[in-house]
Amino acid sequence: MPFTGFDIVIIVLVVLVLLLIFAGIKTVPQGYNHTVERFGRYTRTLSPGLNLIIPFIDRIGAKMNMMEQVLDVPTQEVITRDNAIVAVDGVAFYQVLSAPQAAYQVSGLENAILNLTMTNIRSVMGSMVLDELLSNRDAINDRLLHIVDDAANPWGIKMTRVEIKDINPPANLVESMARQMMAERNKRAQILEAEGLKQAQILEAEGRREAAFRDAEARERAAEAEARATQVVSEAIAKGDVQAVNYFVAQKYTEALAKIGTAGNSKIVLMPYEASSLIGSLGGIGAIARDVFGDGKQPEPRRASGRPPATGPDKG
């Protein structure tokens, strides 16, 4: 059956409608946002999924990546406050929060973020001396993050991290720092050694003081014991006990003999001719010791030589 002109028109219209529908269907992948422009002016943002636009009137403007992205900061030379030249590189992490702002508020988003980061690295690190630069990397990262994030906020950008990767001073400066570090460590070692010697001397002095105190206390107790013994002997003599004198003399006698016998230059020791005198003295010492500290028995009264005690007349 041949097609008439009306049939051909209907077929063409159906094809055009299908083409228009397919032209208006837009698919946005996950993690991206697309901006829609109508006659060159921004109208709305397409979220991930299936979206419809008006063909030939609306068009896709910018395709913005909404995921967190990494931007390498190339190596650059920085002059510190103390005129040291160091080579610094880093890395920046950012995320697009507003697709229209990132697309229409700045031209060349990555280039803008890169130059902003590099400029602030020079500003922040140039205001510090080299020692602070090497020891306060976390503080530098925090300061850079706040400065760059505030500057990129009108672009719909959130700076999540700004990290300094490497700080490379010149070779001669590294050598000088190594010598300085070695000198500082030697200084601390000498200080610790001096402190240890001081503590040892203090402990030794305290030990000598304690020993002297104990020696003095021992001498004091020995003197008290000697005085007590002398007092006891004196009291015995006062009571008429002749053996107390023998005790005292025999004690001094034996002490003198002990000193003579232990002398280093003594080759000959002279002993008394009558050894019985020394034995009798030792016997007197034992008797006196029993009387003074002894067994609780009262000593018998001494009698005159061979005479019975005198008695009175017998009264009956």
Image: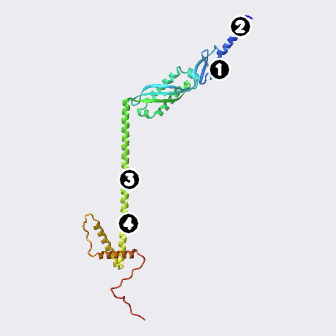
Give the residue at x 46% y 33%. Answer: 137
Q: Quadrant of residue 188?
A: top left
**Mark 3–mark 4 distance (CA, rounded to whole Å):** 27 Å
Q: What number is the disc on residue 51?
A: 1
Q: How far apart are marks 2 and 1 (CA)?
A: 30 Å
Residue type, mark 1 in image = Asn
Question: How many neighbours does mark 3 have within 10 angstroms: few (below 14), some (14-19), or many (20 or more)?
Answer: few
Q: Earlier in the sequence, mark 2 or mark 1?
A: 2
Which residue is labeled 2 in the image?
A: 9
Q: Is residue 279 left or right of residue 315?
A: left
Q: Is mark 4 on a helix, strand or loop?
A: helix
**Residue at x 52% of width, y 22% of height:** 110
Instruction: Please tell me which residue lies in front, 7 or 167.
Output: 7
x, y (%) of residue 169?
A: 40, 30
Quadrant the C terminus occupies: bottom left
User: Which residue in the protein does label 4 denote?
Assistant: 221
Q: Which residue is drawn at 32% across and 75% down?
A: 279
Q: Quadrant of the N terminus?
A: top right
Q: Nearer the observer, disc 2 or disc 1?
A: 2
Q: Position of residue 26 (x, y in %)?
A: 63, 18
Query: As shown in the figure, which amino acid type bears the numbered disc 3?
Result: Leu
